[in-house]
Amino acid sequence: TPVIGVLALQGDVREHLIALAAADAVARPVRRPEELAEVDALVIPGGESTTMSKLAVLFGMLEPLRERVAAGMPVYGTCAGMIMLADKLLDGREDQETLGGIDMIVRRNAFGRQNESFEAKIDFTGIEGGPVEGVFIRAPWVESVGGAAEVLATYDGHTVAVRQGNVLATSFHPELTGDDRVHAYFVDMVRAGL
Ligand code: GLN
C-alpha cells in the first residue's frame, strides 16, 4: 500500500487525507523535511498559494520539495497545489515561489475574476464512469502546456487538468465532493511506480 503525504503547511489537508484513505492509500500530513523523506508520493492541497509558498520557505521545505519532485516523486496538486506545480506562473505575487514539475503556464485566480466559485461536470481523460464534479474556488487555469504535458480535462475552453509523467494537477477540488475517482487515479499512478 502506498504511503501518500499531504503537504500540511496550509489548506484543505484533512479533506485530502480522507479522500486518499477512501482510495486505499495510507495518508499522512507532511510538514517537515523528515516527514517528506518517508512518503512515496505527495498531495499539495487547495488553499492560498502565496501563503503556502511563504510557509514552505519558512519551514525549510522549498528545496526538499523541489528536489523530490525533480527526482520523480508522484505529486498531485489541487487548485493552489496546481499553482505550486507550475513551471511558470502568471498573476502571482512578486515573491511567490513555485516548485515546478509540469511544463505549463498557470494563471492564478483566472476563473476567480469571472466567477468566485462554481461547480461543473468535467470529462476527465482516463477516468471512467462519467464526468467528475468540478468544484472551482478562485481557481487557476492552465494558459498553455509544453510538449511533455498531457491535457486531461478542459472547461469552457480552458485547461483544468494536466499530467506530466508522475505529476498531476487540477484547477478544481475533488477532495470536496466525496467522489474519490481522481484520488484513485492518482493512487494508481503511485502504485504503477512502486
Ligand atoms: N486563489 C488561490 C491561490 O492563489 C487558490 C484557491 C484554491 O486553492 N481554492 O492560491
Image (spheres, rainbow, N blue to C red):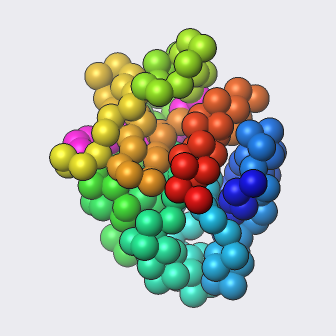
Quadrant holding the N terminus: bottom right
Along the horizontal axis of the image, is 59 left or right of 147? right
Q: Residue at x 49, y 20 (%)?
A: 122
Residue 17 drawn above or below residue 110:
below
Q: Position of residue 70 (x, y in %)?
A: 39, 71
Q: Position of residue 82 (x, y in %)?
A: 46, 51
Seen from the viewer's position, the closer of residues 93 and 72 is 72
Q: Is residue 188 visible?
A: yes
Point out the stretch of residues depicted in magenta. 135-145
Please tell me in which quadrant of the rendered image residue 179 appears.
Answer: top right
Q: Residue at x 46, y 47 (%)?
A: 168
Quadrant holding the C terminus: bottom right
Magenta-colored stretch includes residue 151 = no
Q: Position of residue 133 (x, y in %)?
A: 60, 21
Please tell me in which quadrant of the rendered image residue 71 appears.
Answer: bottom left
Along the horizontal axis of the image, is 190 left or right of 156? right
Residue 94 drawn above or below residue 190:
below
Residue 140 drawn above or below residue 39:
above
Residue 124 drawn above or below residue 164:
above
Q: Main secondary structure of the magenta part?
A: strand
Q: Position of residue 128 (x, y in %)?
A: 55, 19
Along the horizontal axis of the image, is 90 left or right of 67? left
